[in-house]
Image (cartoon, rainbow, N blue to C red):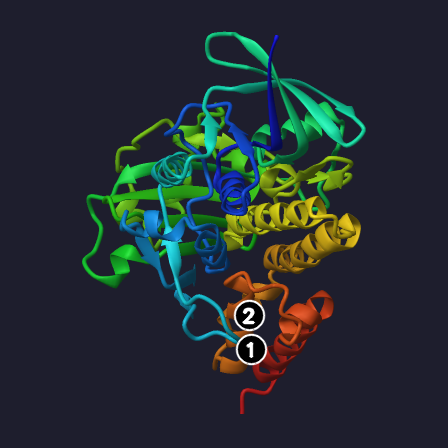
Amino acid sequence: MLKEFVDVLVIGAGPSGCVSACYLHNNNVKVKVVEKTKFPRLVVGESLIPRVMDHFAEAGLFEALDVMHFEKKLGARFIRGEEICIFDFSNKYGKGWDWTWQVPRADFDHTMAQEVIRKGIDLEFESEVVSLSFEGRKSITVVKDAAGVSREIHANFIIDSSGYGRVLPRLLDLDTPSKLDPHSSIFTHVKDVNRPEGEEGTLISFDILETEVWLWVIPFSNGNTSLGVVGPTSFINSLSENKDNREALNNAIKLSDYYVKRFGGVDFLFEPVKLENYARSVKSMYGDGFALTGNSSEFLDPVFSSGVAFATESGMLAAKLYLKESKGEAVNWEEDFTGYMRRGIGVFTTYVKEWYTGNLQTLFFHQPENMDVKQKICSVLAGYVWDETNPFVKKHDNLIKNMAHVLKMESEQKAENPN
């Protein structure tokens, strides 16, 4: 069997894998990337948040992505009946990028992968990991290419950025149940023939159909728009008695007073895809000779578009810690990797949970707006969830819940004593 020897093997060529590979390559590390599929390919996660821009810039990928003129995302809009709440990333607490992109991931990931190859990194498509073994910290990974030919890749370290493929969690039995309630989604793209002119046509929106059910609308610069419905798995399954994803998504669109005229009856560009019980977690995010990044370790929920940000954050961090360790410096993976990532994931987990309880929605739609509160929440939504000078980061466990309780009590008192 043919053998290859590299410093780092990266599994997966999505945002996490590309960021990892580029950072390592820029620091003279011999890296190889294997990707099971052929690009371009369909994948969910089309709404980014500003924190990812730091990673694309640091990895040297920003320029190649910027020239593609993806739709700029300047904030996010949340709709609940007649109520509208808009977050503007330029009006947030603290520092950080004021914008990001909303992207068709097939084009976005393909652009990144081609830039990785242009930089001289060995990226191999249609290369599937078949088995894995360790000799101490070093690994031997058997991969099979599109022609069915197998070979060994010997590496000092593995960064698993395989996303929903979850290669190492499967091979090493690392999966564990998520702490979030089971939710599912159905999505597709449409030719946005009824798109309004100006800002209204480009705004990413989350239309709340019920407290735990919402529709996403993500317009792209190519004239298409991503449409998806998210909710408890039992609700999503109830949208079609025949378990027909097309019927289910059409029925969800009909529930949206805001969007039914724009999208009702519009042809779908591909058969709607269902992601069932999508939340994921793992027993450990690292081990001797490997680290898990992105969706191969944790996936929470699409409501705040945190998936790609955690993917690139963990991908960049794993690469940096490997580089540090390879130079003989001490690395505490439990604290420096797992501890760090868990802190950020913990903040967003609270926001996801409080979204579905309705407490966070109470804060979003309260009138009059408290701009100080809004700016600090906006910073979280932008992905700056490690900034503990922000009380909505540091005290996330209780602050949202407590503030929502106070606002509800005030509303009840006003209802009882209108004068």
Q: Is residue 398 left or right of residue 118?
A: right
Q: Amino acid at mark 2?
A: Ile
Q: Callout 2: 10 Å neighbours few (<14), some, many (20+)?
A: many
As measured in the structure, the alpha-carbon distance from the residue carrying label 1 to the one carrying label 2 is 6 Å
Q: Which residue shows up at 63% across the image and 30% down it?
A: 166
Using residue 5 as the reference point, say whether residue 114 is left or right of it. Answer: left
In the picture shown, does residue 292 fall above or below 141? Answer: below
Which quadrant would the C terminus be assigned to in this image?
Answer: bottom right
Q: Of helix, strand and loop, which one carries label 2? A: helix
Spot occupied by residue 236 in the image (x, y as percentages of width and height) = 53, 37
Q: Image point 33% across, 47% down: which residue?
A: 64
Viewer-nearest residue: 201 or 12? 12
Residue 370 seen in render: no
Image: 319 above or below 125: below
Residue furthest right as drawn: 136
- Residue at figure coordinates x 38%, y 52% from the top left: 62
To which residue does mark 1 refer? 373
Q: Are marks 1 and 2 in contact (CB under 8 Å)?
A: yes
> Horizontal and vertical percent for residue 200?
27, 60
Residue located at (62% from left, 75% from top): 390
356 above or below 177? below
**Position of residue 96 measured from the top left corner of the image (x, y, whole percent):** 48, 68
Give the residue at mark 2.
Answer: 377
Which quadrant of the structure image shows residue 265? top left
How many numbered discs? Answer: 2
Instruction: Say which quadrant the N terminus sits in.
Output: top right
* Residue 30 in view of the camera: yes
Amino acid at the residue labelled 1: Val
Name the side, left or right, on which 213 lies relative to 46: right
Answer with the quarter of the image where residue 28 lies. Answer: top right
Label 1 residue SS: helix
| Neighbourhood count class around disc 1 (C-alpha, 10 Å): few under 14, some 14–19, many 20 upward | some
